[in-house]
Amino acid sequence: MNFIDSHCHLHDPRIISDIPWIEDRARIANVQYMVSCATMEDNFELTAQLSKEFNSILPCFGIHPWFVDSLSGRWKDRLEYYLLSCPSGIGETGLDFTDKTCDRDLQIKVFEHHLMLARELNRPVNIHIRNAWDMFIRILKKMGKLNVPGLIHSYSGSADMIPMFEAFGLYISFSGSVTNPKAKKVVNALKRVSKERFVLETDTPDIYPYLPEPKASRLNEPKNLPAISKIASSRSGMDFEEFSRHAYDNSLNLFHPILQGEKDR
Ligand SMILES: [Zn+2]
């Protein structure tokens, strides 16, 4: 049984010096690929280097909505340069209106640019949406279905919206938040999503899952993905192996465009 971590941040300064061991532990846990998302221009190069060094690391390049105020005047060129330099997805990008003082207009502009690039370059897109569902739906309706699908990472929306997102060609990604015993809303969403449309992620080094064994570290890592899958499968009412196989196949379908070429085996 193999796993794909559909959203993590291996460039993160809290774990970067441990990547060879993290990659090793992931491989032993049958995590075949890790989709590592950059979050700002400053970590594009590191994300690119990691993907060159390790076959199991698939890069995504994008500007996280928290960091839109870090943009340089050349951000569009730099983003395109990295996207064209290697097989890669787009992200982490999206909308986060949790902080009421954030620049919503700038987030929207930056996110729309990422969606436009996804369409132009045929790349899967890794999307972050928090407390901005109405605006997200408005943008999807305006832009129409993407030719290459994307995922909504660590889904926190309602179960009712899922059929609409699926119709837009999106996948729904579940993180360790689904292992929280109090996570009713996320579990309802998990029960609602089609078998062909869910994927799994760790969001390493964040969202440490609620695991039966005591925490070895405060920092999450991709090797925890099978344990997340085990808890998620029991909460969804599906057999562990069947659940994990669907998550794996769905991730392969989603990231197929960037698995071609040098990463193809
Ligand atoms: Zn993330």
Image: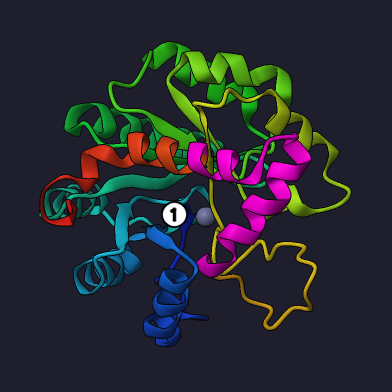
The image quadrant that residue 116 belongs to is top left
Of residues 138 and 234, which is closer to you in this image?
234
Residue extending furthest toward the bottom:
17
Q: Which residues are magenta?
A: 222-246
For the question of whether residue 224 can be seen, the reply is yes
In the rendered image of this protein, does residue 71 appear above or below residue 122? below
Please state the horizontal and vertical placement of residue 249, each as a whole percent of the image: 41, 38
Residue extending furthest toward the right:
182
Of residues 70 and 13, which is closer to you in this image?
13
Of residues 118 and 258, which is closer to you in this image?
258
The image quadrant that residue 130 belongs to is top right
**Secondary structure found at label 1:** loop
Please state the horizontal and vertical placement of residue 65, each as a whole percent of the image: 50, 47
Residue 170 drawn in magenta: no
Give the dominant element type of the magenta stretch: helix, strand or loop: helix
Left or right, residue 2 beside residue 233? left
Left or right, residue 175 beside residue 62? right
Residue 245 drawn in magenta: yes
Left or right, residue 161 beside residue 235? left
Q: Residue at x 58, y 59 (%)?
A: 226
Q: Residue at x 22, y 74 (%)?
A: 53
Please state the horizontal and vertical placement of residue 146, each as a whole percent of the image: 33, 21
In the rendered image of this protein, does residue 220 appear above or below residue 88? below
Give the residue pinned by disc 1: 2
Please state the horizontal and vertical placement of residue 44, each as a whole percent of the image: 29, 63
